Amino acid sequence: MWVELDLQSDVPIYEQLAGQLMEGMASGRLQPGDALPSVRSLASDLGINLHTVNKAYQALRQEGFLQIHRKQGVVVQTQGMPGVTDSFVAKLRRQLRAVAAEAAVRGMDERRFAEECREVFRAVRGSERSGMEE
Amino acid sequence: MWVELDLQSDVPIYEQLAGQLMEGMASGRLQPGDALPSVRSLASDLGINLHTVNKAYQALRQEGFLQIHRKQGVVVQTQGMPGVTDSFVAKLRRQLRAVAAEAAVRGMDERRFAEECREVFRAVRGSERSGMEE
Amino acid sequence: MWVELDLQSDVPIYEQLAGQLMEGMASGRLQPGDALPSVRSLASDLGINLHTVNKAYQALRQEGFLQIHRKQGVVVQTQGMPGVTDSFVAKLRRQLRAVAAEAAVRGMDERRFAEECREVFRAVRGSERSGMEE
Amino acid sequence: MWVELDLQSDVPIYEQLAGQLMEGMASGRLQPGDALPSVRSLASDLGINLHTVNKAYQALRQEGFLQIHRKQGVVVQTQGMPGVTDSFVAKLRRQLRAVAAEAAVRGMDERRFAEECREVFRAVRGSERSGMEE
DNA sequence: GTGGTCTAGACCACG
DNA sequence: GTGGTCTAGACCACG
């Protein structure tokens, strides 16, 4: 799989993995209905423990991004991805505050900050979606 | 002090504290040269451990946002705040990726995302700086 | 058939199926002597595994709610449904404890709880039985 | 502690534990703000693994019944227990359906069923709360 | 074969 | 000392 983990990072592995899967969904590499590797195969593929993979899968399932069936395994949500809920917007803003504050202190101006955000957003959505929407 | 901590959050307290101090600097409530409370007094003020306050102060000092003198205590950096370094931009982008990916998956479009970023940036800079720059 | 399964639920499919059949019997849609679909046909009808349907049938047979004949197939018990045995009452109470405890902790009062129970009971017995008893 | 587990039961241990803690809160043995044993001490006390205790604690925390602080450990929610939300009522009814259906099939009548529910509810609330409300 | 559960044991950040 | 994370390995229900 295209997942890349930094085992040295202080960001927990399961969190990195969940993040990478989220980016996969954002970019379109992972489409609704797509099957993900079983916890065991992905674990051995990435060289980590199956419990660590499971923790990432469970977190994404609980938030509604994945479905986990007993035998069929793990699948990207088909029945309505979570939308832009109020609680998500609140979380988004909370996370942006920390980022924005340091940028402001370092002297980055508003336009530059917004531009960086825009570019990162474009980057995660990737090119594979071109023509899909809008 | 105006710091507010969420003891239930899974974000470490020292990190929350450092973040709040950073927001104080971003908004202008904390100006270069301003003295911060002593480790002892801030700890008892916030009802948290001495070590926790110290850890937040040390982290901000190490990055160049604070100066710590033996007896004069803790002071907001006077000799040039850290600027928009390449490594900061890299960190900024890394942090934005996670945020942007989830926003994209949830169906937020680019314009809305950039607008949220812009507004958060404005909010953290606050009104107290009006007239300082630009 | 009128059975509806939630393949995403963490309740095993065979258990959901047995529950739905039980509700069919409670409502009167399934009467003593009524024939149920064969394991094969129900499985393909519901898009699930043969074993799963079989497991649900066997569980209900073992408890005395169904009869399974070699060639006549599966039939709702004709020779006396299981009654309100002591062991059933014990099981009933055990299951209610968990439900009731959470309701109590959330601040639901006794009257409301009893009322919810009453209404659910009425709902599962349904209207098709009207005139059958009492 | 007063928790009793049935290691033979097919109900997962962590679920039994969470249920017992919930009953403790329902009965008033566990009051808001009360400290619970650390995962380690409760685990050794009950003769089970600390991860199993942790799983029960995390489940109750995620639903809002417990707070987990880094050093202070685990505490019964003080800032507003979860209330009777719509989603809880929906879950309650779903769980009652299965129970009620079998009771109905076995010939238990509505009044008896409601009475059983009422008594179980009284039992879980216990006597220690007498005089607390109403 | 799959995920779910449980155990045992380790290291670390936090406070 | 506490919970958080990770590993390794086991057994089992489900399908």
Image: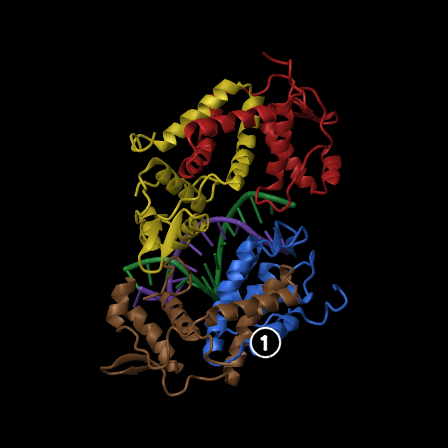
Chain colours: A blue, B brown, C red, D yellow, E purple, F green
At 65% from the left edge and 39% from the top edge, which residue is drawn?
Answer: C5
In the shown orientation, is residue D95 left or right of residue D78? right
Q: Chain of mark 1?
A: A
Q: Residue furthest right?
A: A131
Q: Which residue is mark 1?
A: A116
Name which residue lies at 51% across and 77% down: B91
Q: Nearest the camera: B98 or D36?
A: B98
Residue, x 69% and y 60% (percent of image)? A31
**Residue for point 41% across, 35% down:** C104
Residue C102 appears anywhere in the view: yes
Q: Point out the image quarter for the N terminus of chain B.
A: bottom left
Compared across the picture, whether C1 is left or right of D116 comes to right
The residue lying furthest to the top in this view is C134
User: Is residue B22 or residue C131 the one in the foreground?
Assistant: B22
Left or right: C116 as drawn, with respect to A27: left
What is the x, y in percent for residue D82?
Answer: 44, 44
Image position, residue C122 (x, y; %): 57, 23
In the image: residue B68, left or right of residue A1: left
Mark 1 neighbour density, 10 Å: few (under 14) some (14–19) many (20 or more): some
Q: Amino acid at mark 1?
A: Glu
Nearer to the camera, D76 or C97 = D76
The tally of labels here is: 1
